[in-house]
Image: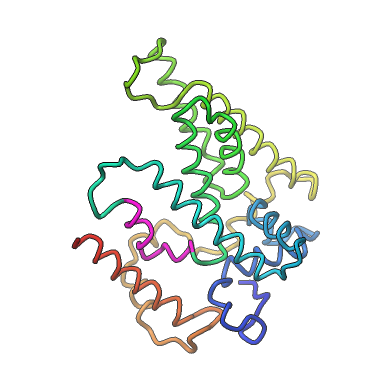
Amino acid sequence: NYVAYTLDAAGFQLPFINWDGQWYLRIAVLGYEPPPSLTVVFYPLLPALIASVMRLGLEPINAGLVVWTLFSATALLTLERLLPREERGPSSLWLLASYPTAFYLSTLYNEALFLTAFFGLLWSLRDARRAPWALLCAAALPLTRGQGLWLAAPLAVAWLVLLLRRVRPQAGASLIAEPASLTSATVGYALGAAAYFAYFGALFGNPLIGVQMAPEMGTGTRFANLFDLPRFLGMLFSPSNNLLDVRDSAFAKAMMMLSFLALLFGVAR
């Protein structure tokens, strides 16, 4: 894994920029350097936003903190708009905020940006007047994470359902999406996906370079890891070398355990 900032350079901010965060900061500062390296595995929207904030005079780490804090708050606020008013506790908002891996919303990762775009898309599909937001959110998804490129599948299902119904349901009936917003989302997705492939095609002459190099990041995202609970628990409870460490931070482990306790508290309530 690439290390741009050590403990001496980042200080107390180190736990918030580790792992993928170090890569995103490198891209924000240096761009995707030729020849193609593992940086192409990381999607371009988040580092582009960080670079934009850096132009306001902030150094890279603080610019990154501003971006992910903004989108973490926006993701939670947007989810709150999606939830039914009568939902009883523990609410879905509480469960998302306190789930152990919610620490990704407190670090320089792209989860907050992705969730903001995803929740924003679901929110905008409910109302034809939100069609511009549907276009923007759908365009952002394939530029943020690989999962965003799969947005074509649910969009196709939504169109199929509307086609089978042929006529618009009566007022108050459940709709998968408003046709106008769904049209905007489809156009937005096409633009976002085209921009992703065109960007890397222009840089390296190969629009698929990011997808092709993804396996070279290692086996850390294997499907089998979902069922390897003993390995996860062993890493979580093993002693760390330092409270703030590049690869084995005791602070990060403590935050995961604190989140789990908050999750149990919410369920118990």
Q: Tell me residue 52's x, y (percent).
A: 73, 56
Q: Is residue 256 above or below residue 154?
A: below
Q: Residue at x 58, y 27 (%)?
A: 184
Magenta stretch: includes residue 72: no
Q: Check the image and name the residue furthest to the top.
A: 167
Q: Tell me residue 207's x, y (percent).
A: 72, 43
Q: Give the image quarter of residue 197.
A: top right
Quadrant location, the C terminus: bottom left
Q: Residue at x 53, y 50 (%)?
A: 114
Q: Is residue 80 above or below residue 40?
A: above
Viewer-proximal residue among 109 and 12: 12
Q: Residue at x 37, y 56 (%)?
A: 96
Magenta segment, principal secondary structure? helix
Q: Tell me residue 149's x, y (percent).
A: 56, 41
Magenta residues (range): 92-105
Q: Is residue 8 above or below residue 151?
A: below
Magenta stretch: includes residue 96: yes
Q: Answer with left or right where residue 95 lies relative to residue 130.
A: left
Q: Residue at x 32, y 51 (%)?
A: 92
